[in-house]
Image: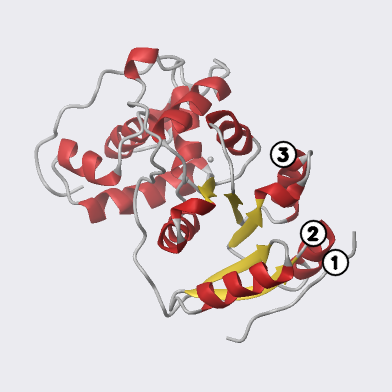
Amino acid sequence: MSSEVGTTPRQTARHAVKPSRLPPRSRKETTVTRPEIDAASPVPILIAARPALYREILARQLANEPDFRIVGQARDEEGIRSILNKEKPRVLLLDYEELGPNAEALISRLRRAAPAARILLLATRSSDETVESILRVGAAGLVAKQLGFEALVRAIRAVAGGELWANRFVTARTVEHLADGRGRASISDQLTARETEIAEAVGRGLRNKEIARRLQIREKTVKSHLNNIFRKLQVDNRFAVGLYVLSLPSMPKDPSPSSGTGS
Protein backbone atom coordinates (compact mmCIF):
# COMPACT_ATOMS: atom_id res chain seq x y z
CA MET A 1 0.00 0.00 0.00
CA SER A 2 1.51 3.32 -1.00
CA SER A 3 1.85 6.18 1.47
CA GLU A 4 0.40 9.60 1.11
CA VAL A 5 1.68 12.41 3.27
CA GLY A 6 0.66 16.05 3.40
CA THR A 7 -0.08 19.00 5.65
CA THR A 8 -2.91 21.45 5.93
CA PRO A 9 -2.70 25.23 5.60
CA ARG A 10 -3.05 26.52 8.26
CA GLN A 11 -2.51 4.65 31.19
CA THR A 12 -3.11 -0.57 38.64
CA ALA A 13 -4.29 -1.15 41.16
CA ARG A 14 -4.80 -2.49 44.91
CA HIS A 15 -6.84 -5.69 44.40
CA ALA A 16 -9.23 -6.34 41.57
CA VAL A 17 -12.28 -4.12 41.84
CA LYS A 18 -15.40 -5.97 42.94
CA PRO A 19 -18.30 -5.80 40.45
CA SER A 20 -20.43 -3.94 42.97
CA ARG A 21 -17.88 -1.13 43.02
CA LEU A 22 -17.67 -0.65 39.30
CA PRO A 23 -19.11 2.63 37.98
CA PRO A 24 -22.59 2.33 36.43
CA ARG A 25 -22.51 1.24 32.81
CA SER A 26 -23.17 3.95 30.31
CA ARG A 27 -22.97 3.97 26.55
CA LYS A 28 -22.18 7.64 26.55
CA GLU A 29 -18.53 8.37 25.91
CA THR A 30 -17.14 10.33 28.82
CA THR A 31 -13.88 11.66 30.13
CA VAL A 32 -12.63 12.73 33.53
CA THR A 33 -11.82 16.36 32.89
CA ARG A 34 -11.81 18.83 30.05
CA PRO A 35 -8.44 20.53 29.71
CA GLU A 36 -8.47 24.28 29.32
CA ILE A 37 -8.05 25.60 25.78
CA ASP A 38 -4.60 27.04 25.20
CA ALA A 39 -4.36 28.75 21.83
CA ALA A 40 -0.79 29.80 22.63
CA SER A 41 0.33 26.16 22.61
CA PRO A 42 -1.86 24.40 20.04
CA VAL A 43 -2.07 20.62 20.13
CA PRO A 44 -0.09 19.08 17.23
CA ILE A 45 -2.24 16.47 15.49
CA LEU A 46 -1.43 13.83 12.89
CA ILE A 47 -4.39 12.46 10.94
CA ALA A 48 -4.39 9.05 9.25
CA ALA A 49 -7.57 8.16 7.37
CA ARG A 50 -8.98 7.29 3.98
CA PRO A 51 -10.23 8.29 1.49
CA ALA A 52 -8.12 11.39 0.84
CA LEU A 53 -11.10 13.74 0.53
CA TYR A 54 -12.48 12.68 3.91
CA ARG A 55 -9.03 13.12 5.49
CA GLU A 56 -8.52 16.57 4.01
CA ILE A 57 -11.96 17.82 5.04
CA LEU A 58 -11.38 16.54 8.57
CA ALA A 59 -7.97 18.23 8.70
CA ARG A 60 -9.37 21.56 7.51
CA GLN A 61 -12.19 21.43 10.06
CA LEU A 62 -9.83 20.65 12.93
CA ALA A 63 -7.35 23.33 11.80
CA ASN A 64 -10.10 25.92 12.44
CA GLU A 65 -9.92 25.19 16.17
CA PRO A 66 -7.60 27.78 17.80
CA ASP A 67 -5.90 25.19 20.02
CA PHE A 68 -5.21 22.62 17.28
CA ARG A 69 -2.39 22.42 14.74
CA ILE A 70 -2.34 19.79 12.01
CA VAL A 71 1.24 18.59 11.48
CA GLY A 72 0.54 16.00 8.81
CA GLN A 73 -1.80 13.64 7.04
CA ALA A 74 -1.20 10.01 6.09
CA ARG A 75 -3.11 7.09 4.64
CA ASP A 76 -1.17 4.18 6.15
CA GLU A 77 1.54 3.16 8.60
CA GLU A 78 4.34 4.05 6.22
CA GLY A 79 3.00 7.56 5.86
CA ILE A 80 2.53 7.92 9.60
CA ARG A 81 6.13 6.88 10.28
CA SER A 82 7.38 9.30 7.64
CA ILE A 83 5.68 12.17 9.46
CA LEU A 84 6.90 10.95 12.87
CA ASN A 85 10.45 11.26 11.59
CA LYS A 86 9.91 15.01 11.20
CA GLU A 87 7.14 15.98 13.61
CA LYS A 88 6.18 15.27 17.23
CA PRO A 89 2.39 15.11 17.29
CA ARG A 90 0.65 15.02 20.64
CA VAL A 91 -2.38 13.23 19.16
CA LEU A 92 -2.51 10.55 16.46
CA LEU A 93 -6.04 10.55 15.06
CA LEU A 94 -6.56 7.22 13.27
CA ASP A 95 -9.47 5.72 11.33
CA TYR A 96 -10.03 2.38 13.09
CA GLU A 97 -11.65 0.67 10.11
CA GLU A 98 -8.62 1.45 7.96
CA LEU A 99 -6.14 -0.16 10.37
CA GLY A 100 -6.99 -3.64 9.10
CA PRO A 101 -7.39 -6.94 10.95
CA ASN A 102 -4.24 -6.38 13.04
CA ALA A 103 -5.28 -3.01 14.43
CA GLU A 104 -4.06 -3.75 17.96
CA ALA A 105 -0.61 -4.72 16.70
CA LEU A 106 -0.39 -1.52 14.67
CA ILE A 107 -1.42 0.58 17.67
CA SER A 108 1.31 -1.12 19.74
CA ARG A 109 3.92 -0.35 17.08
CA LEU A 110 2.88 3.28 16.90
CA ARG A 111 3.01 3.56 20.69
CA ARG A 112 6.61 2.37 20.58
CA ALA A 113 7.45 4.69 17.71
CA ALA A 114 5.87 7.74 19.38
CA PRO A 115 5.59 7.05 23.15
CA ALA A 116 4.67 10.66 23.96
CA ALA A 117 1.78 10.70 21.49
CA ARG A 118 -1.81 9.89 22.42
CA ILE A 119 -3.70 7.64 20.03
CA LEU A 120 -7.37 8.41 19.41
CA LEU A 121 -9.43 6.25 17.07
CA LEU A 122 -12.41 7.14 14.88
CA ALA A 123 -14.82 4.26 14.27
CA THR A 124 -18.07 3.69 12.40
CA ARG A 125 -18.93 0.71 14.61
CA SER A 126 -17.57 -0.20 18.01
CA SER A 127 -18.38 -2.48 20.92
CA ASP A 128 -17.27 -2.55 24.54
CA GLU A 129 -14.88 -5.36 23.57
CA THR A 130 -13.33 -3.22 20.82
CA VAL A 131 -12.80 -0.28 23.14
CA GLU A 132 -11.38 -2.54 25.83
CA SER A 133 -8.93 -4.14 23.39
CA ILE A 134 -7.59 -0.84 22.08
CA LEU A 135 -7.19 0.56 25.61
CA ARG A 136 -5.18 -2.51 26.60
CA VAL A 137 -2.62 -1.90 23.85
CA GLY A 138 -2.19 1.76 24.69
CA ALA A 139 -4.78 3.79 22.79
CA ALA A 140 -6.28 6.73 24.66
CA GLY A 141 -9.82 6.24 23.40
CA LEU A 142 -12.31 5.81 20.58
CA VAL A 143 -14.85 8.22 19.12
CA ALA A 144 -17.89 6.98 17.23
CA LYS A 145 -18.16 8.84 13.93
CA GLN A 146 -21.91 9.30 14.32
CA LEU A 147 -21.42 11.50 17.40
CA GLY A 148 -20.46 14.53 15.33
CA PHE A 149 -17.62 17.00 15.09
CA GLU A 150 -18.03 18.64 18.52
CA ALA A 151 -17.64 15.27 20.24
CA LEU A 152 -14.44 14.71 18.29
CA VAL A 153 -13.07 18.09 19.33
CA ARG A 154 -13.82 17.35 22.99
CA ALA A 155 -12.20 13.94 22.71
CA ILE A 156 -9.01 15.34 21.17
CA ARG A 157 -8.71 17.97 23.89
CA ALA A 158 -9.30 15.33 26.56
CA VAL A 159 -6.72 12.81 25.38
CA ALA A 160 -4.21 15.59 24.66
CA GLY A 161 -4.59 16.52 28.34
CA GLY A 162 -3.76 12.98 29.45
CA GLU A 163 -7.28 11.63 29.83
CA LEU A 164 -9.02 8.58 28.38
CA TRP A 165 -12.04 8.85 26.12
CA ALA A 166 -14.25 5.82 26.76
CA ASN A 167 -17.34 5.01 28.77
CA ARG A 168 -16.56 4.52 32.45
CA PHE A 169 -17.79 0.91 32.62
CA VAL A 170 -15.31 -0.20 29.95
CA THR A 171 -12.50 1.76 31.61
CA ALA A 172 -13.18 0.11 34.97
CA ARG A 173 -13.41 -3.35 33.39
CA THR A 174 -10.11 -2.82 31.59
CA VAL A 175 -8.45 -1.78 34.85
CA GLU A 176 -9.76 -4.93 36.51
CA HIS A 177 -8.50 -7.10 33.66
CA LEU A 178 -5.04 -5.55 33.70
CA ALA A 179 -4.59 -5.84 37.44
CA ASP A 180 -2.11 -8.64 37.96
CA GLY A 181 -2.07 -8.78 41.74
CA ARG A 182 1.69 -8.39 41.97
CA GLY A 183 2.94 -6.64 45.08
CA ARG A 184 4.59 -3.25 44.77
CA ALA A 185 6.13 -0.78 47.14
CA SER A 186 3.58 1.03 49.27
CA ILE A 187 2.25 4.06 47.47
CA SER A 188 2.75 6.07 50.68
CA ASP A 189 6.49 5.49 50.33
CA GLN A 190 6.48 7.59 47.15
CA LEU A 191 3.66 10.08 47.64
CA THR A 192 2.58 12.52 50.31
CA ALA A 193 -0.55 11.75 52.35
CA ARG A 194 -2.64 14.08 50.20
CA GLU A 195 -1.23 12.71 46.95
CA THR A 196 -2.01 9.19 48.19
CA GLU A 197 -5.64 10.17 48.86
CA ILE A 198 -5.95 11.61 45.37
CA ALA A 199 -4.23 8.65 43.68
CA GLU A 200 -6.58 6.24 45.46
CA ALA A 201 -9.58 8.30 44.39
CA VAL A 202 -8.33 8.19 40.80
CA GLY A 203 -8.09 4.41 41.16
CA ARG A 204 -11.83 4.39 41.89
CA GLY A 205 -12.54 6.33 38.71
CA LEU A 206 -13.49 9.62 40.38
CA ARG A 207 -13.38 12.85 38.37
CA ASN A 208 -11.31 15.82 39.48
CA LYS A 209 -14.45 17.68 40.58
CA GLU A 210 -15.59 14.67 42.62
CA ILE A 211 -12.18 14.36 44.27
CA ALA A 212 -12.13 18.07 45.07
CA ARG A 213 -15.59 17.85 46.62
CA ARG A 214 -14.76 14.78 48.72
CA LEU A 215 -11.49 16.21 50.00
CA GLN A 216 -12.86 19.75 50.33
CA ILE A 217 -10.12 21.30 48.22
CA ARG A 218 -10.12 23.23 44.97
CA GLU A 219 -10.14 21.45 41.64
CA LYS A 220 -7.04 23.42 40.64
CA THR A 221 -5.28 21.95 43.68
CA VAL A 222 -6.29 18.43 42.59
CA LYS A 223 -4.75 19.04 39.17
CA SER A 224 -1.54 20.31 40.74
CA HIS A 225 -1.27 17.19 42.92
CA LEU A 226 -1.96 14.98 39.91
CA ASN A 227 0.97 16.52 38.05
CA ASN A 228 3.21 15.66 41.01
CA ILE A 229 1.80 12.12 41.11
CA PHE A 230 2.48 11.63 37.40
CA ARG A 231 6.07 12.76 37.89
CA LYS A 232 6.74 10.60 40.97
CA LEU A 233 5.14 7.45 39.53
CA GLN A 234 6.72 8.12 36.13
CA VAL A 235 3.43 7.93 34.22
CA ASP A 236 1.72 10.40 31.90
CA ASN A 237 -2.01 9.86 32.52
CA ARG A 238 -4.53 9.12 35.28
CA PHE A 239 -5.39 5.70 33.81
CA ALA A 240 -1.84 4.55 34.55
CA VAL A 241 -2.19 5.97 38.09
CA GLY A 242 -5.37 3.92 38.50
CA LEU A 243 -3.60 0.79 37.32
CA TYR A 244 -0.80 1.39 39.82
CA VAL A 245 -3.18 1.93 42.72
CA LEU A 246 -5.30 -1.11 41.91
CA SER A 247 -2.22 -3.34 41.70
CA LEU A 248 -1.33 -2.67 45.33
CA PRO A 249 -2.21 -5.26 48.01
CA SER A 250 -5.35 -3.68 49.44
CA MET A 251 -7.73 -0.93 48.46
CA PRO A 252 -8.77 1.27 51.41
CA LYS A 253 -12.32 2.39 52.02
CA ASP A 254 -13.64 5.43 50.22
CA PRO A 255 -11.90 8.55 51.49
CA SER A 256 -13.86 10.87 53.73
CA PRO A 257 -13.72 14.62 53.24
CA SER A 258 -10.64 16.05 54.86
CA SER A 259 -10.60 19.31 56.71
CA GLY A 260 -9.11 22.43 55.24
CA THR A 261 -9.05 23.88 51.74
CA GLY A 262 -5.39 24.00 50.97
CA SER A 263 -3.21 21.07 50.00
Q: In the image, what residue occupies the spot 62% across and 41% down?
A: 138
Q: Are marks 3 and 2 in contact (CB under 8 Å)?
A: no
Looking at this view, is 60 or 164 the one in front?
60
Query: Alpha carbon of mark 1 to alpha carbon of mark 3: how far?
Result: 20 Å
- The amino acid pointed to by label 1 is Ser
Quadrant of the rendered structure where residue 90 is?
Answer: bottom right
Q: Is disc 2 in contact with disc 1, using a CB cutoff of under 8 Å?
A: yes
* Disc 1, SS: loop
Q: Residue 91, how many percent across, how many down?
A: 58, 60
Residue 232 visible from this viewpoint: yes
Q: CA distance from mark 2 to mark 1?
A: 6 Å
Looking at the rendered structure, which numbered label has been put on residue 3? 1
Identity of the amino acid at label 3? Answer: Glu
N-term mark: 2 or 1: 1
Quarter holding the N terminus is bottom right
Q: Which mark is residue 160?
A: none
Q: Identity of the amino acid at label 2?
A: Asp
| Label 2 sits on residue | 76
Q: Position of residue 232 (x, y in %)?
A: 47, 44
Label 3 Cα crowd, 10 Å radius (few <14 / some 14-19 / many 20+): many
For the question of whether residue 12 can be seen, the reply is: no
Query: Residue at label 3?
Result: 104
Question: Percent from the top left, x then y, of residue 126?
Answer: 57, 38
Give residue 249's position: percent from left, percent from top: 45, 15
Name the side, left or right, on which 136 lies relative to 243: right
In the rendered picture of this protein, how many numbered marks are placed on residues?
Answer: 3
Q: Earlier in the sequence, mark 3 or mark 2?
A: 2
- Describe the colour scheme in one phrase: secondary structure
Residue drawn 69% across the image and 61% down it: 49
